[in-house]
Amino acid sequence: MKKNILSLLFIVLTLPIYSQHNYVKYVKPIIGTQRMGHVYPGASAPFGMVQLSPDTDTIPYSVSGKYNPEVYKYCAGYQYDDKTIVGFSHTHFSGTGHSDLGDFLVMPTVGKLQLNPGTADKPLSGFRSSFTHTNETAEAGYYKVKLDDDNILAELTASNRVGFHQYTFPKSDEAHIILDLMSGIYNYPEKNVWTYVRVVNDTLITGYRQTNGWAKNRIQYFALSFSKPFLSYGSKNFEDKQVYRGFWGKFNQTKNFPEISGKQLRMHFDFKTENQEKIKIKLALSSVSMSGALQNLTAEIQHWNFDSVVKQTQDLWEKELSKIEIEGSNELKENFYTAMYHSFLAPTTYMDIDGKYKGLDQEIHQAKGFTNYTTFSLWDTYRALHPLFNILQPKRNNDMAHSMMKHYEQSAQKMLPIWSHHANDNWCMSGYHSVSVVADAILKNVYTGDPIKALEACVATAKKLNYEGIGDYIDKGFIPAEKSGISVSNTLEYAYDDWAIAQLAKKVNRQDVYEEFMRRSGNWKNNFDKSSGFMRPKLADGTFKKEFDILSTHGQGFIEGNSWNYSFFVPHDPMGLIAIMGGQKSFTQKLDKLFSMNLPDTFFAETEDITRDGIIGGYVHGNEPAHHVAYLYNWTNQPWKTQEKIRTILKMQYKPTPDGLGGNDDCGQMSAWFIFSSLGFYPVAPGSNDYAIGSPSVDYAKLNLENGKSFEIKVLNQSDKNIYVSNMTLNDKPLSKYFITYEDIMKGGTLKITMSDQPEK
Amino acid sequence: MKKNILSLLFIVLTLPIYSQHNYVKYVKPIIGTQRMGHVYPGASAPFGMVQLSPDTDTIPYSVSGKYNPEVYKYCAGYQYDDKTIVGFSHTHFSGTGHSDLGDFLVMPTVGKLQLNPGTADKPLSGFRSSFTHTNETAEAGYYKVKLDDDNILAELTASNRVGFHQYTFPKSDEAHIILDLMSGIYNYPEKNVWTYVRVVNDTLITGYRQTNGWAKNRIQYFALSFSKPFLSYGSKNFEDKQVYRGFWGKFNQTKNFPEISGKQLRMHFDFKTENQEKIKIKLALSSVSMSGALQNLTAEIQHWNFDSVVKQTQDLWEKELSKIEIEGSNELKENFYTAMYHSFLAPTTYMDIDGKYKGLDQEIHQAKGFTNYTTFSLWDTYRALHPLFNILQPKRNNDMAHSMMKHYEQSAQKMLPIWSHHANDNWCMSGYHSVSVVADAILKNVYTGDPIKALEACVATAKKLNYEGIGDYIDKGFIPAEKSGISVSNTLEYAYDDWAIAQLAKKVNRQDVYEEFMRRSGNWKNNFDKSSGFMRPKLADGTFKKEFDILSTHGQGFIEGNSWNYSFFVPHDPMGLIAIMGGQKSFTQKLDKLFSMNLPDTFFAETEDITRDGIIGGYVHGNEPAHHVAYLYNWTNQPWKTQEKIRTILKMQYKPTPDGLGGNDDCGQMSAWFIFSSLGFYPVAPGSNDYAIGSPSVDYAKLNLENGKSFEIKVLNQSDKNIYVSNMTLNDKPLSKYFITYEDIMKGGTLKITMSDQPEK
């Protein structure tokens, strides 16, 4: 009987109580948490510094010195299929394909103290707990789960820099809150460089954790406040070898000792609880110092009203989400607003409330006139996410470009970021795509900094001779296959990036730079093998590499894409590509084949991160190199094929279910693709002001712009069958081509598209 | 022929060219570098942040997990008997008996690059070099040595925060400067937590090193400037296990890569040199940041004139040394001014040029109105060094007391320092003697801070119940032997410290605190065993421990002193001690026996840090607990025995030779004892304003005080035979007792002492 009342209580408690907003209610953070999406279901404010989310496992990066492939599943700490939660940590990437972070894991328990997490198959062997999705709710800025093992309800929310936990305990004389400073994502014993904790008083602790992970030199500071004084506390150092500490023997350092440090620490804070008593935690982050974290904590949340923080953060989300108002099916809205949500998680704020932040040079800097951001997954996000920001978030994108310029100034290499997070560059992936983001922001008049200095930074980056083949690329026009495993990807992407630099140079009247980089932007041709019709690695002697598999990625000169997909990577010169591929007919046939071919099973066996679901024919949507490819039909006489492919991709690759994302969301790039494509247009070549028209899947959309104007998209007769564009007007004037411009959108107006079930051939 | 000219050149170069000052010329930093002195011969400014000195070996603290007793010899990095120098590092303790530091070892070499130091028996196997004392000069603020293996002349000097190296190379196409970030004093593989280096340009690098040594959480930042651009550079990571660094493969990180980090790094910078070409290095330190170090560098030395920095630093030393002008033999002057030099090396400046420093709370603080100091070896230095500062360095001692108060405010434990260095407390030794230093500074009107707050800090420290037996000490009046291996030392020292607190409380009219701590100050009686006549460990049940050896230290309840020495440790109540020991006759007999007994060989076998040379009878001068004991005859009717013993100790324990110090100099305490005792008086109980008269060994001394006054000591008929005081006048008035006061000195005046070869019985 009692148990029934408790169950009923849990049902009531697990109803989504905070979903009174118009758009927040469509956000399902659980979408993409199964399989390859690599998003996290926890709580974050828009572009927030804190991403407070459950970790369902803490798999080591390597076992006995060997890479552990299981770790890949846990890029965001959470896998939907898991049955246990280890705890709740404060930093997570959204949708990445390599990882880091997972700082400061907190877990509430009752009963005998356990300082080991235990294993997924035996959760009772440690502090982790079983859970079920029935008792789990994930909303934008709010997460709730019942921890079954100890009958504790866990609720999470976050302001920009503060994670707010609310734990509802059963009655217990042995209630604990575990703070695990060892736990982390993509962890390995050597990742923790040092941790330090200072117990300031019985409700406040501060500290830091330094790690050597994907970011080599990362320090995360924190300040943690408890709503209720703990009765006692302690720590355990799990380090294998501990060094001499003779004179420290004067204290018992494991119990109520207020200054703890070491490499592998777990702490516990002990309480007595009444039934249904709530213990709350606020944990603020800082890249600057413990006092910086404390200042963030004090400035952002002055009270213990959990619900009001949930409301405040969901109000912020509502404001961001309502930048696009759409009409369409419920399923579409769930997909769309979840994509909006995922697009607005990263880049993340990387600056204290007073403007101080740690720079790439490991010094503390003061941001003047901009918000400093980090988490730049640029190989992914230059394609559609930053272009989306130029429309919906120009102020933030301006700040992001400023952040990249500061990165450049602070860089020992004097380079713009490649893939940067937390005052480090992890140098991930090919190209130097920050130049695209910076150039595009300037070309669209979004960037308020000095464009000449920005051009200098782009040029310096593109001329870093000892970086990943750039020297050869400049000397020979291609990168010899002997020197790089990803020579073709790099040459193709450098060529596009160079074109973006040229556009910027032109804008600031640097004709010399324009001409130099326009020349470089044609280097893609040097890897095109006319005999096979594909992009192909070339040897230093100028001949193409003999052994070559157009379907394979590994060892073929490409990264996250085979030659079939990469051969279309000339976003800045589709007409040139069409010409070199033998003209319109030959080109469209090739595109058709990409979308219709049957791949052999060996393809999937070899390729990380790709399943049959993430593929249409040979077109891989789960990785980014082909994201623009379906739009290339617009440069031919068959734009209706773009419309057809886009609708297929939208339908197949995005579903409002835990397994609904066809690949890593990649810090919002997959989601930004969805938003653009659902609205009916896409930025094929950032740096250009043109968007290629696709096939809108919304019935209506209104973009509420920061400049106070709005741009409406009215879609007539749209349905699952009526996927072809039959008529278009812009501000009631007929559109003669399948393109609109940035200016068309930003000055406000109405795009009217009439759909049909018949292609306009 | 050519070789002869070179040899001649070296003879000229190795002459002491900088000794034109009156007092600097008597300073022989080489005194005490042999055997137990543990001082370093290198260059430092008075109380300087930088101690730039040669390291003759880098012995690991432990081998295969076992303590390596050889490490003890290398507390200061240098042993006179060694034949090779590994390099020159920037931080060294002066005279300590446990150690740390040795940061940023620099070594010039020519020929094939060697990144291993090699071994002492095969110096050519690595970058270390042979040297001889013939080619070595050590002065205050200047050090020079010829490195024989590569025929390089190395010269060192230092401003407060900058170490300045000058290396004279032979002609070479392969000249190198090694920067070893692994090397350290009391090193072990786990001590290096992390190092980071940033090559800013071809003459400037910055970085830091984080260590987990005697200081558990220590970060030392640096900025290093070369006088000549290096042609190339590189690094090697000697870490056993290196972690995943996939995307970093884009660079060759070992060569000309400008951002290097890891746990075990050595770097090299490559040059071509002409014959006799000088390459100079300035390396600045900071506890705050790399930019703080760079600021220190720029602020302190704007040029490359090595000689002018030597002069500037030696001028500073001359100013400090001339605070006491003495007359006496050359040998005496060498001993005296070297003692002055050693007394003014520590505590060390711990603050950037702009007043920023790292606090004990690991936060960056701004010093307002004081200079922040660190390296507080208080168990040693409260006895005579800080009392000496109250006379000669009141401004600095005031700043030191302020630094200790900041330590208290920043302390997680809310305690004043025990043994603190570099934003850490290493908790070394017994007692809480910072209370003595703080109280004494207030009682002598040297401290300008709030005395009430200072009293609060002293009381809080003395009531830290879970620290080293304090709870029991308060409850029972002694510390049960079961609970602490050094129960008697602690009880005796706490009792003295409590008396100092009581004196402070009295001064600020806190009668309650005065009474409480006067009661506590009598606790020494609880460990006095009347049956044996010695201080003796007591069990929790109140009975004395049965097994007890008055000669042994280990496991007997004492630290660095046996019961024979410690039994006289009641500096604040000699009359009480005399009474309890059976009155004057019995007491003097016991003292006589201490100085005349014959110790068994087993004593020396068991006792670390003591040789027969360091002992007079059973009196141990090499350790501190008995430093006041020879003066205790002044409380009996046999003060002439004090005079006799003091002269014996002065003669036997201090010699102007490399092996001239009878024990660790202990950050200047041994030297301060020498200065006081040579002048003829000593502070038996800091906190009291009285100094006990001994037997001056100077013929004349003039103390030039900061208040503009001077105090003269005129000693008539003093000689090696005339060691007894026969007559004393103060300002021409007869002195009726063997004491003078602080006020007597500070208001200026003349103490005239007439000596005789006959004791005044």
Image (tube, coloured by chain):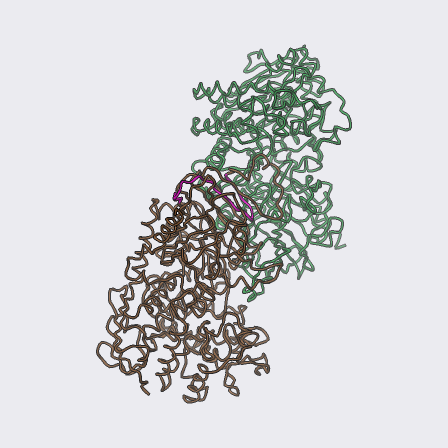
Chain colours: A brown, B green
Q: In screen coordinates, is A567 left or right of B332? A: left
Farthest residue toward the right? B601
Q: In screen coordinates, is B127 left or right of B744? A: right
Q: Splitting the image into 4 quarters, where does residue A496 fall?
A: bottom left
- Return the x and y of residue A645 as percentages of the image width and height: 39, 79
Farthest residue toward the left? A732
- Residues A356 and B51: in front is A356
Residue A55, placed above or below residue B533? below
- Return the x and y of residue A438 as percentages of the image width and height: 39, 67
- Residues B384 and B704: in front is B384
Residue B210, placed above or below residue A529? above
Specify the segment rendered in magenta: A258-279
Q: How many marks?
A: 0
Residue A223, placed above or below residue B234? above
- Residues B165 and A692: in front is A692
- Quarter in which the C terminus of chain A is drawn: bottom left
Tell whether position A312 is magenta. Answer: no
Q: Can the viewer see residue B262 in this picture?
A: yes
Tell whether position A267 is magenta. Answer: yes
Q: In screen coordinates, is B101 left or right of A492? A: right
Q: Can the viewer see residue B22 in this picture?
A: no
- Return the x and y of residue B740 as percentages of the image width and height: 56, 17
Q: In screen coordinates, is B325 left or right of B404? A: right
- Return the x and y of residue B366 as percentages of the image width and height: 44, 41
